[in-house]
Image (spheres, rainbow, N blue to C red):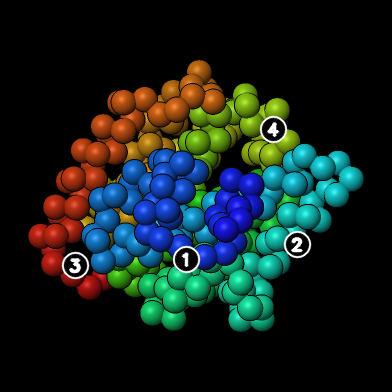
């Protein structure tokens, strides 16, 4: 079997254990939040998070290759677009389970394409706050929308609030690692640190976690980390999550999971 850098293996079966460990290493925050989802959707959400990680890794060539610029990353993203649109043979071990989830109606194809479009936008940075907001809503926001879809959320107004949660989490993470990101070459917020914090707080307010129905509250556990990240400075840049952050997610996760179970996964 072969590997593509630190990414998914390109050949062979994708085992549940391998996928879970890969997601845990690459995206520990969302992996922790996913642990509180019902077993019936946990595997599919793991595939979603692995897909998001693969898209994010596609940005790496653009950050390190001055000659290639964004072309290498755009080519990799176009490959995934072709797979999602059925125009290419899914010869990557992650593609079959992702397409299976689409066929079973776990996720909406348009949501996954929006996540992909956000990564494409990052390779073509524009100093426009409106473009940046859409990138956050489609990218990190799209991930949380897809988690809501997996939980059976159908109300568009609720799904939009889940997007706001994801955008708040992404903004908080950007603020938390601001000094390091400024040196990474990655497309950042087109403004200063104060403005970034205000945008994150606005996303979090738009989510309004407390008034979400049970499935919605279970889908927005990253909001716990968003609130904590937006309330502090960037002293933790480059550092792993502390115990306080993890315990806060666990408390909220147990509470949300119990409420979801009591609700009987009521239709939304």
SS under mark 4: loop
How far apart marks 3 and 4 lie (CA) works out to: 42 Å
Which residue is labeled 1 in the image? 13
Image disc number at residue 166: none
Q: Nearer the viewer, mark 1 or mark 2?
A: 1
How far apart marks 2 and 4 lie (CA) works out to: 21 Å
- Quadrant for the N terminus in the image: bottom right
Q: Earlier in the sequence, mark 3 or mark 2?
A: 2
Query: Quarter-wise, where is residue 162 in the image?
Result: bottom left
Left/right of residue 186 with respect to residue 207 in the rendered view? right
- Quadrant for the C terminus in the image: bottom left
SS under mark 1: loop
Q: Earlier in the sequence, mark 1 or mark 3?
A: 1
Q: Are marks 2 and 4 in contact (CB under 8 Å)?
A: no
- The residue carrying pointer 2 sits among few (fewer than 14), some (14 to 19) or many (20 or more) residues within 10 Å by Cα, namely few
Which residue is labeled 2 in the image? 75
Q: Earlier in the sequence, mark 1 or mark 2?
A: 1
The x, y position of residue 112, in whole percent, is 53, 66
The x, y position of residue 194, in whole percent, is 57, 28
Q: Are marks 1 and 4 in contact (CB under 8 Å)?
A: no
Kindly identify the residue that appears in the image at 48 percent across and 69 percent down.
98
Q: Earlier in the sequence, mark 2 or mark 4?
A: 2
Which residue is labeled 4 in the image? 184
Kindly identify the residue that appears in the image at 69 percent across and 57 percent down.
120
- The residue carrying pointer 4 sits among few (fewer than 14), some (14 to 19) or many (20 or more) residues within 10 Å by Cα, namely few
Which residue is labeled 3 in the image? 265
How far apart marks 1 and 3 lie (CA) works out to: 32 Å
SS under mark 3: loop
Question: Would you place residue 12 above or below residue 6 in this image?
Answer: below
Name, please, the residue furthest toward the front: 1
Q: Nearer the viewer, mark 3 or mark 2?
A: 2
């Amino acid at each position: 079997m072969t590997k593509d850098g630190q990414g998914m293996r390109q050949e062979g079966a994708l085992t549940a254990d391998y996928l879970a460990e890969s997601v845990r290493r690459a995206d520990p925050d969302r992996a922790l939040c996913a642990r509180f989802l019902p077993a019936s959707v946990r595997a599919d959400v793991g595939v979603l998070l692995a897909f998001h990680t693969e898209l994010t890794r596609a940005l790496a060539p653009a950050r390190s290759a001055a000659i290639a610029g964004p072309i290498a990353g755009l080519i990799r993203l176009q490959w995934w677009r072709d797979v999602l649109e059925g125009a290419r043979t899914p010869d990557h071990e992650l593609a079959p389970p992702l397409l299976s989830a689409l066929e079973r109606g776990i996720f909406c194809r348009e949501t996954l394409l929006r996540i992909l479009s956000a990564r494409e936008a990052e390779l073509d940075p524009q100093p426009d706050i409106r473009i940046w907001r859409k990138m956050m809503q489609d990218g990190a926001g799209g991930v949380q929308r897809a988690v809501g879809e997996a939980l059976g959320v159908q109300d568009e107004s609720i799904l939009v609030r889940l997007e706001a949660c994801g955008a708040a989490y992404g903004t908080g993470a950007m603020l938390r690692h601001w000094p390091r990101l400024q040196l990474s070459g990655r497309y950042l917020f087109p403004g200063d640190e104060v403005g970034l914090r205000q945008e994150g707080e606005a996303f979090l307010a738009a989510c309004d976690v407390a008034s979400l129905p049970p499935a919605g509250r279970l889908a927005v556990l990253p909001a716990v980390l968003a609130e904590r990240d937006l309330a502090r400075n960037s002293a933790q840049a480059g550092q792993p999550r502390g115990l306080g952050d993890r315990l806060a997610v666990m408390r909220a996760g147990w509470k949300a999971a119990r409420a979801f179970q009591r609700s009987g996964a009521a239709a939304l």
